[in-house]
Image (cartoon, coloured by chain):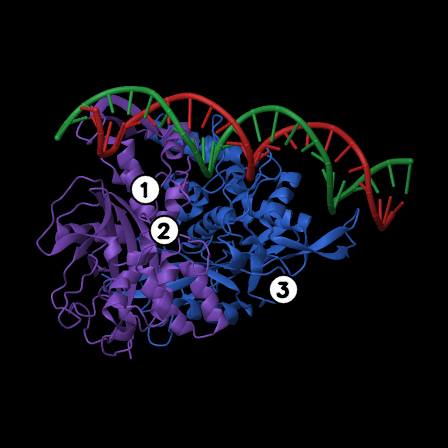
Chain colours: A blue, B purple, C red, D green
Amino acid sequence: MPNSVVIGLSAVVVAIREGEAVVLTVRPRGPEFKGQQVQGLPFGPFDPAGHRTFELALRAFVTEQTRFNLGYVEQLYTFGDKGRDAPLADMGEGPGDGASRVISVGYLALAPAALERHTPDSDWQPWSRFFPWEDWREGRPSALGPIEEALRRWADGDAQRLSRARLMFALDGATWNEERVLERYELLYEAGLAHEAARDRGEHPLDQPERLKAALGEPMISDHRRILATALSRLRGKLKYRPVVFELMPEAFTLSALQRAVEAIVGAPLHKQNFRRALERAELVQGLGRLETDTGGRPAELFRFRREALRARPVSGLTIPLVRD
Amino acid sequence: MPNSVVIGLSAVVVAIREGEAVVLTVRPRGPEFKGQQVQGLPFGPFDPAGHRTFELALRAFVTEQTRFNLGYVEQLYTFGDKGRDAPLADMGEGPGDGASRVISVGYLALAPAALERHTPDSDWQPWSRFFPWEDWREGRPSALGPIEEALRRWADGDAQRLSRARLMFALDGATWNEERVLERYELLYEAGLAHEAARDRGEHPLDQPERLKAALGEPMISDHRRILATALSRLRGKLKYRPVVFELMPEAFTLSALQRAVEAIVGAPLHKQNFRRALERAELVQGLGRLETDTGGRPAELFRFRREALRARPVSGLTIPLVRD
DNA sequence: TCAAAAGTGTTATCCTTACACCCATGT
DNA sequence: ACATGGGTGTAAGGATAACACTTTTGA
């Protein structure tokens, strides 16, 4: 019976590297699943005596674990349900063997696309590794094939289940809603497909055919994949009503690089001209006159984010002119 | 030195009563400020041994404290900073005298405009009592006069401060952004104007002229007014991208009642025809053929929310066609 | 009959979408 | 010269904002 509470802080640190959206991960000391090295997010316990705020605590141990300094930070969600394997469980920090209840506060951090330093134990991973079904930039991802089959087996005629699966995973002609990352992951978890589901029930690793296993993505320790899904949901949503992409860009960038960054986050291709026109109208960027030469074609003009634009008026995000295909 | 953590849950329960947006409040046992009865939100400690999830815990004690059953519930934010007087401080629940650090998880709940039951210790209060500057339905609220003066005294030539005050409180012709409720409250707190600021520093209640005092609204216990501000911010934002107003309406309602509800939340008058046209286009409501007779004028048709609309496609909220005045 | 609130019609303007085309560089 | 990516023009359709006006009841 737990009668005390420990607070765990986890950070989803997002960056753009070579046009890909990547997440900072750490390799915890001991592997959880036999044979495979399971990744986690940078995380640590909150010290009620020492730390003045969550955010300060978070910044401190992310730097410590990854030698990386956070820029933009925002709180995501606080998870408190029993039974979802919570962080710290294997850290030997708290009283240990489940005697204290662990509450998990997730944070989203955005890193400008520059710094590369990290410890040998931390790494940048594209998040499609963890959510292969979320990347529609090259059309409908192939991962959805096996997932659809498995979900239909799970639904097995149950109208409720079937309708949820249809809605979330765009089956039977339903339209894909890129913001529902968390709901999709939770559905897979509920359906017992996400690898973490079996683990949390104390069961053996799932015995799934290779094709399905690959489609379901890599698991993470604890509830970190859920926190990651929350982050992706939030970021995809936020893009549309606040100009946050710029937190991920270097000082000077080309419009194509900016578009690729948005595409990497949203997981869908955008319409070039309309994307640019929207930027222009919002007066969010300013040309620098300088050119980027190694583009492979005609040199591209470099732009900078007009931070002043934030002061002037209530500024919304970018419109996301998806190309329908 | 605190070395343990207690989790406090607080609920902002919103309802519409007689066209006004109201919040469920409780009167805590002992008054905090001399002479005046300070209100609080329904709140309670989270029991790590007994409660399976935050939400279940929350539902349980709101019902217990107010005899009210929550419908729609969503997590708002988790506050953990030291020094903001946190809930439970006077509840004798934890180890007591500040030995344990209190973390405060805020929730937003929406109640259909029907039930009236509550205990003698709980009550519905219009939130303009706590934020008199947030209601622009009758034009620029008079509370902004004294607030503007006080803020200018606080800024006193400091360009940073002045620019923040201008932006947040629409001074010098800046436009009002109704979503920034929390940022406005935090600015007032930082400026030492919000009554809670002095309290948290252990100082005497502020000695402010009556006019300013009234303009700054009623304080609440602990950090509850901050949580309330968070709720209002979130709700005002959410209205625009998810059809949440309907959670506040009874089964059948007139379009005017719906408009008044939105106006009460947003704190601004809306354009009638454009509001209706937007509703129509989104196919969010369906006429029932029945009429509401006691409208004071021509009877109005009753409508219902088409919950089915949610299933069909990714459905956004209402456009908020403000009337510029 | 008149006040009060419900409900409708119409237009200018702006934004979004979709189309196709031209430009500057490296190989 | 041609491939590659950068960058532009324009027109159709739809959504928004702003106008003022008609309808139906109760007092």
Q: Secondary structure at mark 3?
A: loop
* Mark 3 lies on residue: A116
Q: Image quadrant of residue A6?
A: bottom left
In the rendered structure, which amino acid carries the disc numbered 1? Val
The percent coordinates of residue B223 (x first, y second) are 27, 65
Residue nearest the observer in this picture, B87 or B227: B227
* Mark 1 lies on residue: B262
Going by the image, does B259 lie left or right of B61?
right
CB contact under 8 Å: marks 3 and 2: no
Going by the image, does B260 lie left or right of A196?
left
* Mark 2 lies on residue: B234
- Real-space Cα separation, disc 3 to disc 1, in angstroms: 48 Å
Q: Nearer the viewer, mark 3 or mark 1?
A: 1
Q: Mark 1 or mark 2, which has the lower sequence index? A: 2
Q: Is residue B50 above or below residue A207?
A: below
Q: Quadrant of the C terminus of chain A?
A: top right
Q: Image quadrant of residue A116?
A: bottom right
Residue located 39% across and 48% down the image = B237
**Pointer 1 indicates a residue of which chain?**
B
The percent coordinates of residue A313 (x first, y second) are 50, 54
In the rendered structure, which amino acid carries the disc numbered 2? Arg
